[in-house]
Structures are given as structure tokens and as C-alpha cells.
Amino acid sequence: MVEIFDISYAEVEIIRDLWEKNRQYHEKNSEYFKESYHLIRFDERIQAFSGFNEENMKISVVKNKDEYIGYCISVIDGRKGELETLHVDETHREKGLGRELVDKHLQWMDQKKCQAIGVTVSQENETAIGFYKKLGFYPNTLYMQKK
């Protein structure tokens, strides 16, 4: 049985393995920034969320029986909501779980009266770009980075 529920920042350790799979996916599929993805560490990335109070941060997980198979982390800063990171294990993709997670977070941001909602996606990740376009997100700016 698949269930989706929220966890607190104090419980975020339970997504470590999934987060690492997400990092490895980006490292493997990046043409220009493999080394950058290789160097990102869970503890450092998650520490960035420690400045947000529980009211302005939402962490949702997907659990199938005893296994965590997905997560989404979003934050609100002022009136701007941001989908920070999303991952569904590749063995459970194409079942609507990613969309369900994002919908849950978009509803939360709407309830919090966010005036803008964004997501940063690697330009190389065409699958994610297509996914977010289906949800009504479109490119606004393109940030370019020198290797």
C-alpha cells in the first residue's frame, strides 16, 4: 500500500538514500556538470533548509510498505514558494506519484497565499522539464554557468 505523508525537518534523514539516488541520477546524466553533482553532499544540502521554520517548509514522503520511494521538499520565502527537490525511485515512476507530491505542495503554497511558485530544473533534464510543463510551469530565465 502506497501512502504519502509529511515529516518534520528532524526526520529528514529518512530520505538520505533517495536523495543520494537523485544526486547520482543528475551526476550520471549531466553532460557539463558531473563533477559538481558528484561533490554535493546530503548533509550540506539539507542544512540549507535549517533556516526555515516548520511553517514555511514542507517535506512529504511516499512510502510503499516498509520502503520510502519518493519525497518532495518545498519552502516559502515571503510570498514566493519554491519546489526545492523532488524524487521518485525509478522503479515507481510513471504511476503519478511525482505529480501527487507536487500537487500536494502546490496546494499548500496556494493556502499560504504564495504570489509566485517556482522550481529550478537542470537544463539538461528534459524529462523533468516536460513533467513541470505539464503542471503549468514554464521557463522564465536561463541561468548559465561556466564549468
Image (tube, helix red, strand yellow):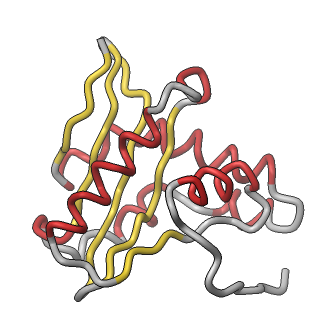
Q: Quadrant of residue 43?
A: bottom left
Q: Is residue 141 above or below residue 125?
A: below
Which residue is pictured at 25% across the width and 79% down the height? 114
Which residue is pictured at 27% across the width and 52% down the height? 59
Q: Residue 28, position in %: x, y? A: 79, 46
Which residue is pictured at 59% across the width and 21% down the height? 91
Q: Nearer the viewer, residue 139 or 25?
A: 139
Q: Residue 54, position in %: x, y? A: 12, 65
Q: Nearer the viewer, residue 125 or 14?
A: 125
Q: Nearer the viewer, residue 18 or 1?
A: 1
Q: Residue 17, position in %: x, y? A: 47, 36
Q: Is residue 24 above or below residue 64?
A: below
Image quadrant holding the N terminus, namely top left
Q: Is residue 48 above or below residue 83?
A: below
Is 115 on the left or on the right of 11, as rendered?
right
Image quadrant holding the C terminus, namely bottom right
Which residue is pictured at 50% across the width and 43% down the height? 87
Q: Is residue 119 above or below residue 69?
A: below
Q: Residue 145, position in %: x, y? A: 77, 85
